[in-house]
Image (tube, grey):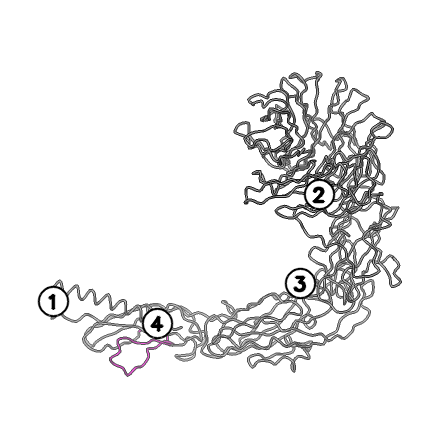
Amino acid sequence: MRADSLPRIAFTLGRYGLLLAATLIATGCKTDTGPDDPTILGDPPTEAYLGVEYYYNFGAFGGERILDFSLTNAPSWLALEDTSNKARPGIIMRGVPGLSGGARGDADLGKQENINLLTTDGERAGMQPFDIEVKRNPLSLEADTFTEGEASEAPEEADNRCQAPDLESTGSHSYEINLFDEAGDVIATAPRTGETTPVLVKVLLEQPSVTRVAVAFELTSEFDPEDCDQDFIPDHQRCEEGDANRDEAIIGRDIVALGSNSAGRLPIPDYLRYERDDNNVYSRGVVTLEPGITECYIRLEVVDDTVPEPSESLRLTLTEIRSGLAALGPSDTEVRTTLVIDDNEPVVRLETLGGQQRDAISVGTEREFVAVLTGEREGTIRARLAENEDSVAKAGDYVISTRNEEDLWVEDPTLTFPAGVDRVRFRVSVPDDYTNPGLNDRFLQLAPDQQYQAGRENFAGSADDAELRVNINELLTPLALNDGNAFVPTDLTVGHDGRLFVAGYDSAADDRVLVRIYDQKGSLLQEVAVSDATVVLDQPDPVIAFAQRTVTRDNTRIDRFEFAVSYQAVNDIPGQTSSGGRDAVTTLFWFDSAQPAGSEYVELWTLRAGTGGHDDPRWIGINDSNGAVFVAGETTGRWAGQTRGGGQDSFLQRIDTVTDGDARVPDIAWTRQTGSSADDSVVAGSAATASAYLFGTTTGAIGESGGQGMSDGFFYSASTAEGALDIYQVGTDGDEVVTDGLYTPSNLWLLGNSDRTYTIDEQDEANNILVGEPLNGTNGFILGYSPAGSVNRAFSFGSEDRTGMETFRSLLLFDGDLIAAGSTTGAFVDDAPGGTTQAILGRMDPDGKPEEGDSDDDPDAETETDPDAETDPGEGDGEAEESTDTAVATELWRAQYLVDDAEYRVIANYRDDEIVALFRQTVGGNAQWSVFLFSGEGVKLN
């Protein structure tokens, strides 16, 4: 350790000179004072290290003659430098703990206190006491993650570093692998010789030693070929590649210190010596750090094999100091680091033909998918597919088929990627005899079969996002909801365990409000009578919402399942007071597992509320955190404490559930009302946050934003009973009729219809302008706004022939994308005949993820349209329509159901697995209602 205190000495002497000058001035410049006592300047380092030079240059002043120096109570290794320069104003103190003063080694460790440096001019004396603690000089290791086939980067040259070994050449290593049969039994071994890539581990010495330091190293691993998975014994794949060994590197196969054939290909630096272990593998050695070197290197070799593997780990340990004074870490016991090896085999990702990773398939049918291979490879690569551990569907529930050499589809879960082919199709089918006793659909989580592929050569690994999720649908025909004109469904949602909740009214029983609950197979589980049988209603148009939330009961966190229904009523209702005109009646139900099967959902409370005018609920929601029920609707009256806009206003209401003794009862926390002087329509809301949102359409001007055109959209949020509402009226100078709204954390989305297509003129971050261009017919639109009212997405859904009339009604968030549903009188997809009202669906990626499409390198591959897929005439992929916004959106697909006088009224989301659509068709003058299911790719499932 060298520490020079000359700057400190200069500062101290300078300060002394100033003091001396001040003294002379104060005494009238008298110069006959006596000399000062000798004074030693400086603070020596308080730490020293074994084998490392300790050095310090003291300063001194005072006395009348040349000063002499001496040490007392000093350790044996420390001494003053002998100098013949008697005029020197200081002294150098130096030593090497463990070596100088008798080479005492570890005996010099510890703290020596009250060491004294004395100086004298023969008459006067000065003294400087100090302490020194001698510590070990520890070694440490440092390594980056290694990747097969990639060499480490050479460190820059420096005086304190060893010269980096050759990292540009490659080595070679011979080893043996096990060969497995289909069941995983070891049937033979085979020799292999693989190329190796050199990698570095840094060996760091904390302080530069004055002597050569040689330290032994060794590679070790937790790999144990006798450690097998349960019910397996050696020799088996489930031992070598089982749970205990899957992440452990095999020394001699995955990594070596020196390859068996590398000596002539990778020159060994002088400071490295390799040694063989008991298996005749170079896995040990010695690295030597010359005096003054604090960074040196152990070069290892990673074997570039052809086996797909997860990241594997092993240890490199410094085991013994062979020469020199250094320590194995601060405690001189062991230095160890974990080495990680990443695989470089090509990897597979499974997708739908549209580039997604979720789809659905009906029992008794099959769907075609694609496996995409990425990464460098040579020759033919294979991939075996199977369900992963997260899959609910298991072997036997599905069949995988691939093309054989004769180009015929055969049952085979192994995909083959010939040289130059990176995309291969496969089929998944569900047999006719498939059964599932559960309420929820099973889903297949398909991925490369790592358990089978482990240890087998020329198979592909699994990409980070490799899995394909395929839902298995058991509702094979449309679910009929009405018998003649009796039951009229108006809204639907999906609840717990896949239950489908359909709200509506019975037109043959005084329009009594009912909720019918079905399972995923279409069986009716429960019919809930919402309104009283004695009350006569007039098209009450109920809306419904479901929530699953976590509550505390008896100090235990449990899931609570609730649904709420709101409808309009004029006539008296038992136990409820009329406010005048049509009132909003809201009922909350919850799931009581103690009730008999078929009657589990029971009423919790009912609330009738309204103004002196008409109050019609149009949307209901339940906050899944606090259970608050929100109702949005239209009023021609004035709610208490609110200001009436005129005509038909919007209102947004929060209803809490409070306790009254042992009962739970409703309590209106607040109601907010706003509107224009014209009629305003409410189309949707959101209870996803503490501030509920309302979406609507107006032909007037609401709030301070003013009117934009003939019909505009508007939205606002509310969380309290008081305070000004921030109302955003949006649109162009055209006619934008909003029909649905949706909240997401990134945007508020408005669905609607107009006679324009839209772009965004980007003014600045907070002031984009929506621009509309007229077109023939009507066009569906989706507009995205920030909560502050700035438009940042604009997308148009129009007929391919530009002459149809689109009428969109419902918007849905599905796996991060937007699904829009409604009807058209034109050709919404290519070659549709048009001319009648037909039901349509479309999917749009609002963030503009690029479509990779499906372009197999196989020249004989089928086209993207599967001729055997269960689709309806006219359903399929339409051309993406041009749209411009601050981030260009991507239209993923379109579907048109070619039956007349039909539309999709409401759509719901089942687990991001299926799109549930409320379908209406006029047949013989009567409305027939049913439920259709679609996959995320737009394929009709029933």
Q: Is residue 56 left or right of residue 171?
A: left
Question: In front of the other: label 1 or label 3?
Answer: 1
N-terminal label among 3 and 2: 3
Provide residue 695's location: percent of width, then percent of height: 64, 33
- Marks 2 and 1 sit apart, C-alpha to C-alpha, by 95 Å
Label 3–label 2 contact, CB within 8 A: no
Q: Of the residues shown, which amino acid type is indicated by label 3?
A: Ser
**Magenta part mainly helix, strand or loop?**
loop
Instruction: Please state the horizontal and vertical placement of residue 775, each as a whole percent of the image.
Output: 71, 39
| Distance between mark 4 and mark 1 Cα atoms | 35 Å
| Amino acid residing under circle 4 | Asp
Q: Which residue is mark 1?
A: 29
* Element type at mark 4: strand
Q: Is residue 732 left or right of residue 189?
A: left
Nearer to the camera, 181 or 10: 10
Q: Nearer the viewer, mark 2 or mark 1?
A: 2
The span from disc 4 to disc 3 (Cα, nearest Å) is 49 Å
Percent from the top left, x then y, of residue 822? 75, 36
Q: Classify mark 1: helix, strand or loop.
A: loop
User: Helix, strand or loop at disc 2?
Assistant: strand
Q: Which residue is mark 3?
A: 311
Task: Give the mark nearest the N terminus, 4 or 1.
Answer: 4
- Residue 84 on the magenta segment: yes
Residue under numbered circle 4: 4
Q: CA distance from mark 2 to mark 4?
A: 70 Å
Compared across the picture, whether 19 is left or right of 198 comes to left
Mark 3 and mark 2: Cα distance apart in space: 34 Å
Which residue is tagged 2? 814
Mark 4 or mark 3: whose residue is earlier in sequence: 4
